[in-house]
Image (cartoon, rainbow, N blue to C red):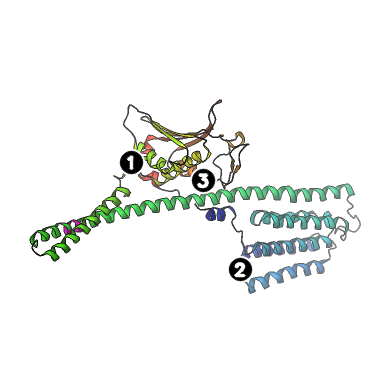
Amino acid sequence: MTDVAASDFRHPRRHVRLDTILRLRWLAALGQLAAIFVVAQGLEFDVPVIPCIAIVALSAALNLVLQVTFNPMQRLEPVYAAALLALNIVELAALLFLTGGLQNPFSFLFLAPVLISATALPIRLTMALGVLAMACASALVFFHLPLPWEGDEPLVLPPIYLFGVWLSILLAIGVTSLYAFQVTEDTRKLSDALAATELVLTREQHLTQLDGLAAAAAHELGTPLSTIFLISRELEKTVSGNGQIASDLKTLREQAQRCRDILAKITQLSATGAPFDRMPLSTLIEEVVAPHRDFGVAIKVRIAVAGTREPVGSRNPAILYGVGNILENAVDFARNTVEVNAWWNNETVEIVISDDGPGIAPDMLKRIGEPYLSRRRGADESEHHGLGLGVFIARTLLERTGAKVSFTNRTFPDHGAVVQIAWPRSRFEDVETAAEPAA
């Protein structure tokens, strides 16, 4: 995957549909009207009904204008979505100013727009909305009309209680929004990484399919080319006395033979994807290792001799990419040597890839394989930059083929990382299910 593609996954643009914001605003307006009606008519409290309804009416009018003027299905730029959420905060602050400030139990609704922003908008806009909500809550501590209550028994809350309400609102906005943002961001990272995994697997399978088409074309073209070759050779014998025609027929025969040789090479290099297109474990390892030789790091391959026959599996793009990516990572971090060991028995097929590099940091051992996780080369070397998608994609693809992937470090005094990939033999030798990506 290219750096540009990886960057697109790492920093996805976040757009919220206008319809989503409008639905939330309509819900808020209906809830505010219901609250005003219940307090004024049901509880018979002295509420400034007209100013409150005027604020709700202005909010509803803006909703109507937006719904008529723009396509509700269009996606808003983050700054415009944040502006509408900020307007929600200001409208709520105005209603609370008319109905008792922070003494009003609905004052905790300041949290709602900030939480929505935390799950859908960039962190900078969420922080700006949080600051606005905190500023409005702080202003309402000092500036507000009396809380609607029974006239003969007015409710008087002690200052220390109001301070606690104010502090709890601020803490709820900060802590809850941060938690919601973190959870949403982790989910988004995982979703983006899985999408990248699907792209990689699709690309590998597409290349495999192209190999199959090339092999099929070579097979189909082989017969007519053989016919052309044979006929041209026979005609060349019959017109041996005519130098010009014989020369042309010789050229035709040589070119037909050249086409046959080219198609033979394509057939050897291609994989048909058919059930008989299978490769032993040793061949699979050699195909993975070959592109990484001659890079200044020695790659030692050891295939254990077992009492059972060597496992033979399909030429699975997921296995080739996953093992190849882990091997590439080992070559990248190794100082001198990378070892690839393989063994099998009747139940298990296992590949172990180890290097003599700095190893995996202890604090990362439990997190290795997560998307967008970077890794350092060592204290005396430069930091290894990257999105950390490679190991995640490799692990995901291998686990989809039935493998169990584990990461450890070599036992002291040796140093370096060790990656163990183990399949149940039945899954490794399975052709169909191992090659299918998960939906």
Residue at the right extreme, as displayed: 152
**Residue 245 location in percent, x, y?**
13, 65
Closer to the N terminus: mark 2 or mark 1?
Answer: 2
Q: On residue 279, which mark appears?
A: 1
Viewer-closest of 331 and 14: 331
The residues tagged by marks 2 and 1 sit, at their Cα atoms, a distance apart of: 55 Å
Disc 2 + disc 1, Cβ < 8 Å = no
Q: Principal SS element in the magenta part?
A: helix
In the displayed structure, would residue 380 be above or below residue 13? above
| Residue 215 in the image: above or below residue 313 | below
Residue 353 location (% of width, % of height): 46, 35
Q: Residue furthest top?
A: 413
Query: Is 225 a magenta residue?
Result: yes
Label 3 secondary element:
helix
Q: Quadrant of residue 47?
A: bottom right
CA distance separating discs 2 and 3: 39 Å
Residues packed near mark 1 inside 10 Å, few (<14), some (14 to 19) or many (20 plus): some
Q: Amino acid at mark 1?
A: Met
Q: Is residue 265 left or right of residue 168?
A: left
Q: Residue at x 65, y 63 (%)?
A: 21
Residue on which the image places disc 2: 72
SS class of the residue under badge 2?
Answer: loop
Q: Gap between marks 1 and 3, in whole Å?
A: 25 Å
- Residue 316 covered by magenta stretch: no
- Could one spot residue 227 in this view of the protein? yes
Identify residue for label 3.
Answer: 390
Q: In the rendered structure, which segment of residues is drawn in magenta?
A: 224-228
Disc 2 or 3, which lies upstream in sequence?
2
- Amino acid type at circle 3 is Gly
Q: Position of residue 437 (x, y in %)?
A: 43, 48
- Kind of element beneath mark 1: strand
Q: Tell me which amino acid carries mark 2.
A: Pro
